[in-house]
Image: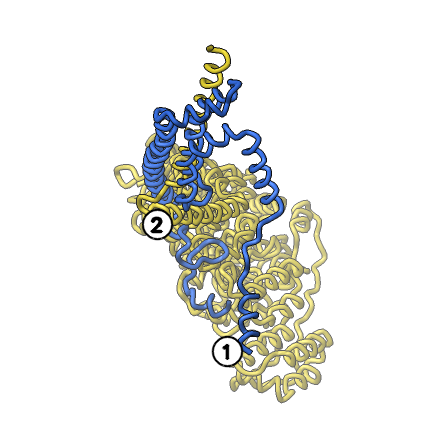
Chain colours: A blue, B yellow
Amino acid sequence: MAKKKNNKKSKNIKKPKISFKALFLFFLAIIGCILYLPTAILFIVGMLPTFVSYITDTQTGKNKTFTIGAINFSGCFYYLVHIWNTSHPMDVAMNYLSNPMTIVVIYSAAGLGYVINYVATVIVSSILRQKGLLRLEKIEERKRKLEERWGEKVNGERPLDGQGFLLENPDNLEESA
Amino acid sequence: MSNTAESIDTDKSEKDTTSSENTISGNDEIILNGDFRIRVEEPLSYLDKGKIRAYRTIRGSRHGANLFALVCDRSMTPRFLSKTKYMAIVNPNLCKLVQSGKVFWPSHQQERYCFIYEDTVGNPYIKQDEKNPALGWKPENVLSNIVAPMVTVLRDLRNKELAHGEIWPGNMFDGGAKPGQKINLGECLALPASSNLPSLYEPIERALADPMGRGPGDISDDLYSFGASLAVMLRSEDPMNGVSDSKVIECKIEKGSYATLLGKERLSGAILELLRGLLYDDPVQRWTIEDIEAWQDGRRLSPKQSPKRAKATRPIMFMNEKYIRPELLAKDLFLDPDEAAKLIDNNEMDQWVERAIEDKTIKNRLEQATQDISGYERGGSYNNRATVAVAHALYADCCVQYKDIQFQPQGFGKYLTYAYVQNIDIDPYVDVIKYNFITPVIRESRSLDKGILSSTFEHARNFIKQKGLSAGLERCIYILNPEAPCLSPILDKYYVQTTADMMNAFESICEKSSKATILFDRHVISFLSVKDRQNIDPYLSELSLNDPRKKALAQLKILATIQKRLGLDGYPAITQWALNNFSSVFERFHDSEKSNSLKQQAEKMARDGDLKGFAALFDNPKLYEHDVDAFFQAKEHYQKLVDERNLIEKELSKGDRYGRNTGRQIASVISMIISFLIMIVAVYKAFLGG
């Protein structure tokens, strides 16, 4: 009996399914890394801040990761171009990785991404807040003007007849309804 | 103090009333149409006509021609519709009408209608209150000085189809000459026809009626009055001295008018023939103008045999008196309708007519009357109504005698108006209109225009049963008396004869009181509807509603329609009044901007007195539809604003988190652009920059 129950439980637990497409891309990436190993080494090391951001960014859309990643990649790209432009890429790649300046430059680029993300978010949020408050004022002004022109009954808070006039005895309407 | 006036010509009156003003000048003079000065302190009592007072009047300068004014009474409707016919008669022996119109009479504090005549008439042959007139003039003088000129006057009256109604020595004047040497016939417009004519000068059937209810009569009645007047001039004594009017009538029925008026007076020659011809009691037998002219030419007409009045072989007892003539019984039946009803119900009347009178005509009429009575509703005034029917069966030309009123059907309108204004008990008059017992009377009468009269009474009866604003007794007054002024208490100070008069009176009222004044009551509505139903009838249903908005709109439309149809000038005070009453209409609009815009336009119209333009502003059925549609659109828009506000407030309530997502998105875009630029620079440096 206990075995049967365990079987049932195991059936209910869904195992994460890996799609064929993902598997295919993974193998393609492995093959790409093997084929272009110097580029892969530099990319993996250089893009570490982005990977960290990807893991820590819980927002839908991962905009923060995208912001950091884009600048981070541009930092890597400078060195990658040099690797692609040489006849001994592995040596050049190892040379870059062994030079702390390379890591500083690439990770500073990622930091710039962080800064851009922080500053832009704060500024835009503030602007939008002010805009919202202004819109609220305009809405209140528009409502006031509508009430001035059409009367208080335009707010729809009290029951009206078919001609738009206040019902003298709204209870009757409710009863008839 | 100013008031409107009216020119003589009825057609022109509408324009004149708005253009000219009648004023009270110094020295107690009342000015009519700017030219005629009525001297209030100079009454001419010898020209008075009962309640109607005469005053010396001057035209233009103080040395102008002598005139006299007759100032009419509101209750005794003057014959202003006959004014044009009267003016068209140019005869030196008829008092000449010079002007007429309304004046403000200070002693009564109200407008009065007045007629102004040339004062060349002299003194009347007899005083108004002369009891037993007998002038004893020589026949030859009468023939040459009275008959000849009077025939020309009567011919002119006949040609204009105007019954004078006041031919008697009290209204005949000597023109300043010795009595009997000259004749000027007095006027006949200031009072209802025959209302000031003593019954002595009236044919029997008209003499039986109340003076106010005799009706206009016709030329035949004038000829009778002329004959009676001649008799009075010729006789040297009154054979009926000290006898009451009722007894004189009885005597006329019994012996005939000639014998009653002249008694044993011996007249000879031509004048005797004329008198006999004019004093025939049967209007069919009575001489006509042609007969008189033939007689003047020397042709001697064979005297017509007057049909003998029916006489019973045995009397019938009524009110402890014996009656042998059906006419006399008919004359007195109304005095005790209960006893009369008994005679009818127990067939005593039928038997008397059938066995004692043996007149087939009367018998047939009585049978018809009995049949009519069987259809009457019992109770109430049944006895009175039955009495009227039977009286007419016995005497076809007898006036209607119902309860306390006696009248000829043609004279009922003015009779009713008189009673209404004088606050006399109106119930018998209402009964006459309400119950159709007058229809057989009209049917049996010989000298009436039956068709028109029947339809007029039928028309009135339809309205007296209704309770609408334009129905009831008020409307009946104006249907039955087309010459009646509007008797509305609102217009108490004004003499309103036409719709244009009413507009002028309204303007005056509104000028004096700009506050909320009621201009439309049952009298005004009935008067307007009777005068021209197109002015008011389309708006009657709205006018009777309790909705102040619809009522105000209906009132404006009526006033605007009158202004448009009559082509009248501006009425600023009325328009302002209408505007003051329009608050409910402006409140009806949801759109205050539209309402204010209309109000501004209406105020401009009010300054110009343009009722038509004012009404046109609201004469658009889609005006309210558009307003309602726009209101609901505005309401929907308002709701969207509320929804948007709620959404924004909800977002703002998130505090610092508000807008962060958007900020991150923008940051992504910025970083992408920067990274792209860096990559371009990197590629450039690596491959091209060396």
- Percent across and percent down for residue A70 are 44, 31
> Do marks 1 and 2 share a subunit?
yes
Q: Secondary structure at mark 1?
A: helix
| Count of number-bearing discs | 2
Q: Is residue B4 visible?
A: no
Relative to B498, residue B64 above or below: above
Q: Mark 1 — residue?
A: B335
Q: Secondary structure at mark 2?
A: strand
Please name the residue shown 50% across and 14% down the image.
B687
Q: Nearer the viewer, residue B485 or B89?
A: B485
Q: Amino acid at mark 2?
A: Gln
The quadrant holding residue A63 is top left
- Percent across and percent down for residue B380 are 52, 80
- Percent across and percent down for residue B30 are 33, 40
- Percent across and percent down for residue B105 are 33, 47
Q: Nearer the viewer, residue B142 or A71?
A: A71
- Which label number is shown at residue B110? 2
Task: First in sequence, mark 1 or 2: give its number.
Answer: 2
User: Mark 2 belongs to which subunit?
Assistant: B
Q: Amino acid at mark 1?
A: Leu
Q: CA distance from mark 1 to mark 2?
A: 39 Å
In the displayed orientation, state which residue is furthest to the left: B27
Q: Tell me if B288 is positioned left or right of B52 in this view.
A: right
Q: Alpha-carbon neighbours of circle 2 within 10 Å: few (<14), some, or many (≥20)?
A: some
